[in-house]
Image (spheres, grey):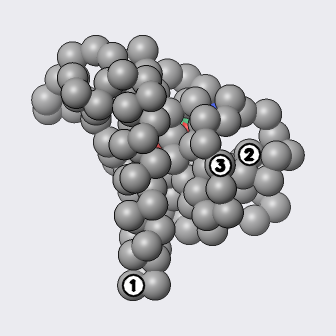
Amino acid sequence: MEDCIFCRIAQGEMDAKILYSDEEVVAFQDINPQAPVHFLVIPRKHLHSAFQLGEEDQHLLYKIFHVIREISREKGIDQEGVRILTNVAPGAGQSVFHLHFHALGGRRMLWPPG
Ligand code: DGP
């Protein structure tokens, strides 16, 4: 989608610190990190949110979680704990309307979240 910033990052038209990229998914540092480690993993396919996932996207979900695990290992946070989340709709905090999973670590996570 032309006016989607995450599509533009995935296509290399906008700068981001890319951590991983293949034909299906892209991972990059969050521009406004909320923890010592905070990255996002997105499908290249433009989906508005997790609620637009279809049965045909099952592999994509596996892939996203696989990439999160691998990057978490590389960053050395996989053992101590990683908060993985996706916001759906503004009321839950979604501000970019291209499906993305946050992965946060490197500090103690609180529950309940704000
Ligand atoms: P959410 O609020 O759940 O939709 O998360 C959107 C996240 O995206 C937020 O943590 C900040 C991040 N973000 C927004 N714009 C950019 C950008 O242009 N580059 C990068 N790297 N991250 C962005």
Q: Which label's residue is closer to the chain start, 2 or 3?
A: 2
Nearer to me, 104 or 18: 18
Q: Is mark 3 within 8 Å of ligand 1?
A: no
Do tag 3 and tag 1 residues touch (Cβ < 8 Å)? no
The residue shown at (37%, 31%) is 73
The residue shown at (28%, 15%) is 107
Q: Mark 3 to mark 1: distance in Å?
A: 23 Å
Q: Is residue 98 left or right of residue 53?
A: right
Q: Position of residue 105 (x, y in %)?
A: 33, 24
Q: Mark 1 to mark 2: distance in Å?
A: 26 Å
Q: Which residue is mark 2?
A: 9
Amino acid at pointer 1: Glu
* Neighbour tally class for label 3: few under 14, some 14-19, many 20 plus, Cα within 10 Å: some
* Label 2 secondary element: helix
Query: Which of the labelled discs sits on residue 55, or is there none?
Result: 1
- Quadrant in which residue 76 is drawn: top left
Q: Which label's residue is closer to the chain start, 1 or 2?
A: 2
Q: Quadrant of ligand 1?
A: top right
Q: Is mark 2 within 8 Å of ligand 1?
A: yes
Q: Which residue is mark 3?
A: 21
Residue 29 lies, with reference to residue 2, above or below; the image says: above
Q: Is residue 9 left or right of residue 22?
A: right
* Neighbour tally class for label 2: few under 14, some 14-19, many 20 plus, Cα within 10 Å: some
* Label 1 secondary element: helix
Nearer to me, 93 or 74: 74
Q: Is residue 105 left or right of residue 112?
A: right
Q: Which label's residue is closer to the chain start, 3 or 1?
A: 3
Nearer to me, 48 or 61: 61
